[in-house]
Image (cartoon, rainbow, N blue to C red):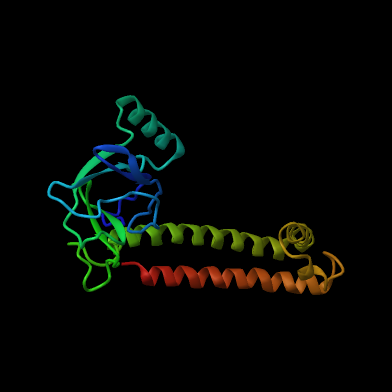
Amino acid sequence: MDYAGQGIRYYYVVAPSDDKNRGGGESIGPYSAGGIMCCYSVPQKWHEGLSVDVVVSYPLEGDTTDERSESLARREAEGKLNETIHVDVPKYEMPASGTLWVQFLPDKKATVVVSDLSPTHDEFPGEVKGWPVPSEEYRGKLIDQKLALAQDRLERDQRDLIKFNRDPENTLNEYWNLFNRTRATDVLDRFSGANDPQFESFLEDYLKNNLESDENEIQMLQDARP
């Protein structure tokens, strides 16, 4: 589980004294949780000094493909593709049962908990309770990304509706061909072709509905922004 909101490219856990005892390998989105990965084994009996190494690769820096590629090359050259967090395993019920929970925390820290209970349970033995909760900053970032996509669609649909009003013949042919490529054939079975007056009426309603849907989505996203 990622409580830091940074996200994880991949990670695995390995016993400090036994490289063959390891498990994990998945990626985790910011403020998200992954699934159960196979297969790391803890001793049936807990003992003082029990620990685990969490080997993690954090997301690459940059927003573009080129920037992330440069970040990857730099890490590889510096030998810093992975980072190892040495974590003490807190005392657990014996004999051991359940799951080894890995909780990623801010400042590149981590904690582990051995339990058959989830973090939302009242008796979960870990210090960090509950599932990760996205920060307002992160939620705002996601909404801004969705807003940008919705605004792009709105502009495209506005252009298409203007084009339909100015040049209906070409627009009808373009959309007829588009629907034939991307939509189920039964959608167009009721029309004889691009010049069918019923198809013209259908396309006009389709474009107007898209426009209305875009505007409603943009309004909802704006209202939901922190």
**Residue 12, x across and y down, in percent:** 34, 45
**Residue 224, x across and y down, in percent:** 37, 70
**Residue in view at x 40 percent, y 35 percent:** 67
Q: Is residue 40 above or below residue 68?
A: below
**Residue in view at x 17 percent, y 62 percent:** 127
Question: Is 48 positioned to the left or the right of 210 in the image?
Answer: left
**Residue in view at x 75 percent, y 74 percent:** 201
Question: Is 106 positioned to the left or the right of 62 in the image?
Answer: left
Give the quarter of the image for residue 79: top left
User: Which residue extends farthest left?
Assistant: 48
**Residue in view at x 84 percent, y 66 percent:** 195
**Residue 34, x across and y down, in percent:** 38, 57
Q: Is residue 71 above or below residue 119?
A: above
Question: Is 74 positioned to the left or the right of 219 in the image?
Answer: left
Which of the image's four quarters has the C terminus? bottom left
Which of the image's four quarters has the N terminus? bottom left
Give the quarter of the image for residue 196: bottom right
- 141 vs 127, nearest the viewer: 127
**Residue 167, x across and y down, in percent:** 75, 60
